[in-house]
Amino acid sequence: MAITIEHPEWLAKFCSQTLNTNCPNTDKTISLGSLTSIEMPESNNMTVSDGASESHRHQFCFDSELGRVRAKYSETMIETIMLQREALWLSRLNSQGLSTQRCLDFYRDGSRAALLTNYVEGQSLSELIKHNQTSDITVVANVIDQLLSELEELHRCGYVHGDIKPSNILLSEQNIVSFIDFSNARRVGDSWQERGIEQYSPSYTYPNSASSQLSRGEAHPVCDSYASLITVALLIGVPADELPFGLDSSQVIDFFLGLPQHETWPSLPKLTQESVQRHIDSVIKDLI
């Protein structure tokens, strides 16, 4: 349910300037009272390299001549750097047609920043899983197919998302899957650290104990494949307490080898099974 919340004056001014720039025939000033919040999934397990937990960046939406606009803002240096990085990546991906979320405007002044994007109506996969809406195997298979297809397209272009997890994957009202939160995106081979900051979600992070050829400090598509397989496991009904969190490489391999034995697996279309299996093979090959 939407509730009115108080936002800093600079943010309302920035939103008003963006609206008037993009819609020159209107002269509207967005007041603090007209900015309303919406329920958005929080990520409590995202951390930065200095060991401090990253608080959930402020997010809200408002309606305008541009349609419904999603706004994220920050007032600390670390969060502002992350938000600026996300704006850069959204603009880069938009130019290649890789993201349904468009960067409308970005503002930075010292340690504070704001990012405006179009708002995608729908729900995150974390909400889908949380509310037990994964019993329809047709819906689940469609989500898995799109998730892996979008991921493979991103990798073909030489990019790694870097933070694949259910809360960063949206399912629109038209059942179209899209990724959000590109603040940790990288080109393949780039360092995960930037300005001393390393952002990650522990539950979906590639095992540190992996004895593979993959350099632990560089972005690689297999990192996204691993996180996507954890997401697939949740979608087909694997309980969260059975996921390979904190396990060594051999235990992770055993988990993925057993995934096709899950009771839901035979109900998935053959093409979906083959697509998931390709990513399983890729991860296991690297972990061995």
Image (tube, grey):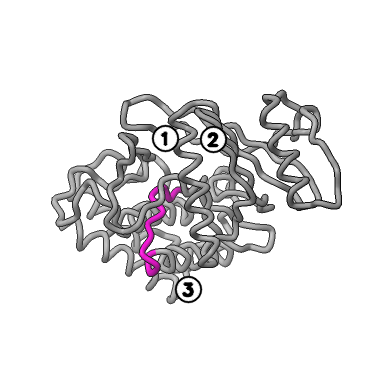
Question: Mark 2 highlights which residue?
Answer: 42
Q: Which mark is residue 269?
A: 3
- From this view, report whether residue 97 is shown above or below residue 32: below
- From this view, report whether residue 242 is shown above or below residue 213: above
Give coordinates of residue 6: x percent, y percent.
Answer: 71, 23
Q: Give the dominant element type of the magenta stretch: helix, strand or loop.
A: loop
Which stretch did the figure color magenta? 155-165
Amino acid under label 2? Glu
- Is 269 or 47 nearer to us in this picture? 47
Based on the picture, tell me whether residue 64 belongs to the magenta stretch: no
- The C terminus appears in which quarter of the rendering? bottom left
Q: How many labels, in total?
A: 3
Residue at disc 3, secondary structure: loop
> Real-space Cα distance between discs 3 and 2?
32 Å
The residue located at (70%, 40%) in the rendering is 61
Q: Which mark is residue 259?
A: none
Residue 4 figure quarter: top right
Amino acid under label 3? Pro
